[in-house]
């Protein structure tokens, strides 16, 4: 019953997220021929940081693997995964204000309630990370290109593990507020701040698996660090609910 209840409370966030990510993944694939037609028009005489970014993007786009990584795993897919990880995380025990006290009054421990809610959200996030990325591999032959399923799996795993940090952060924040908006806005602000400080913390670089793309090496240390951070945040959410007096 608890699994089903968790699914009912998060299903629309998950289904909308899956639909949007699939559409974005399909658009990434089918826009590649148009991108290639525009390549001769890319300016090469622009100087400074902007010119460097333009040349890097153009160089990546010349190869289909580089194009998929730069457009999906480094940009669109990463941004969508972060957003929906936060949205799924804010569907905590207290965010459903009309049924929060009923949920907490069920004859199960608060630890079990939080564990099932977290497991449900992480399972949905796992599907959001893998299904659209695998769809890119399946749709690529339609434009006479191929994208390795193995690469899609590695990138999806990195996307999921790193995005789970934002899920767990939002999940923890949702235990401090009875309303949806404060934890959602705080988590989004932290995600933006982490994006600015990514050169220092590297959460988004782990999410895009830049090391794997450039060298072929899986970023095991980064994955371990983000997995530990995610587990610690989820544990903090359990402790927070256990200590609250309702």
Image (tube, grey):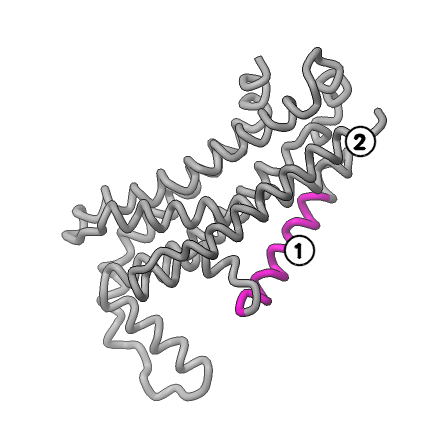
In the rendered image, residue 198, in percent from the top left (x then y), is placed at 54, 65
| Image mark for residue 242 | none
Residue 75 location in percent, x, y?
Answer: 43, 58
The residue sitting at 81% across, 30% down in the picture is 244
Read off the residue under disc 2: 243
Residue 231, quarter of picture: top right
Mark identifier at residue 189: 1
Q: Give the range drawn in magenta.
A: 183-199
Q: Quadrant of the N terminus?
A: top right
Q: Residue at x 56, y 47 (%)?
A: 228
The image position of residue 15, as x and y in percent, is: 47, 31
Residue 155, above or below 117: below
Measured Cα–Cα span from mark 1 to mark 2: 26 Å
Q: Picture quarter containing residue 2? A: top right
Quarter of the image with the C terminus in it: top right
* Residue 4 in the figure: left or right of residue 53: right
* Whether label 1 touches label 2, CB < 8 Å: no
Question: Is 239 in front, or is 7?
Answer: 239
Q: Most prominent secondary structure in the magenta stretch? A: helix
Q: Residue at x 60, y 60 (%)?
A: 194
Q: Does the magenta stretch include residue 189?
A: yes
User: Which badge, 1 or 2, is on the more N-terminal residue?
Assistant: 1
**Between residues 130 and 80, which one lies in front from this camera angle?**
130
């Amino acid at each position: 019953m608890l699994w089903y209840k968790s699914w009912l409370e998060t299903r629309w966030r998950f289904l909308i997220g899956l639909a949007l990510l699939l559409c974005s993944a399909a658009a990434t694939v089918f826009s590649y021929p148009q991108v290639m037609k525009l390549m001769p028009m890319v300016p090469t005489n622009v100087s400074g940081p902007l010119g460097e970014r333009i040349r890097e993007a153009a160089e990546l786009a010349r190869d289909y693997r580089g194009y998929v990584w730069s457009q999906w795993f480094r940009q669109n897919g990463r941004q969508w995964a972060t957003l929906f990880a936060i949205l799924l995380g804010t569907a905590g025990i207290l965010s459903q204000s009309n049924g929060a006290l009923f949920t907490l009054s069920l004859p199960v421990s608060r630890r079990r309630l939080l564990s099932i809610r977290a497991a449900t959200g992480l399972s949905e996030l796992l599907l959001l990370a893998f299904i659209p990325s695998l769809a890119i591999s399946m749709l690529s032959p339609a434009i006479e290109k191929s994208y390795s399923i193995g690469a899609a799996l590695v990138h999806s795993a990195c996307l999921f593990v790193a995005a789970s940090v934002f899920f767990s952060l939002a999940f923890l924040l949702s235990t401090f507020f009875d309303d949806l908006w404060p934890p959602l806005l705080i988590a989004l602000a932290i995600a933006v701040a982490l994006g600015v400080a990514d050169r220092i913390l590297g959460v988004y670089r782990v999410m895009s698996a830049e090391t794997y793309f450039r060298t072929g090496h899986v970023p095991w240390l980064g994955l371990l660090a983000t997995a530990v951070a995610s587990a610690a945040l989820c544990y903090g959410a359990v402790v927070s609910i256990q200590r609250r007096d309702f």
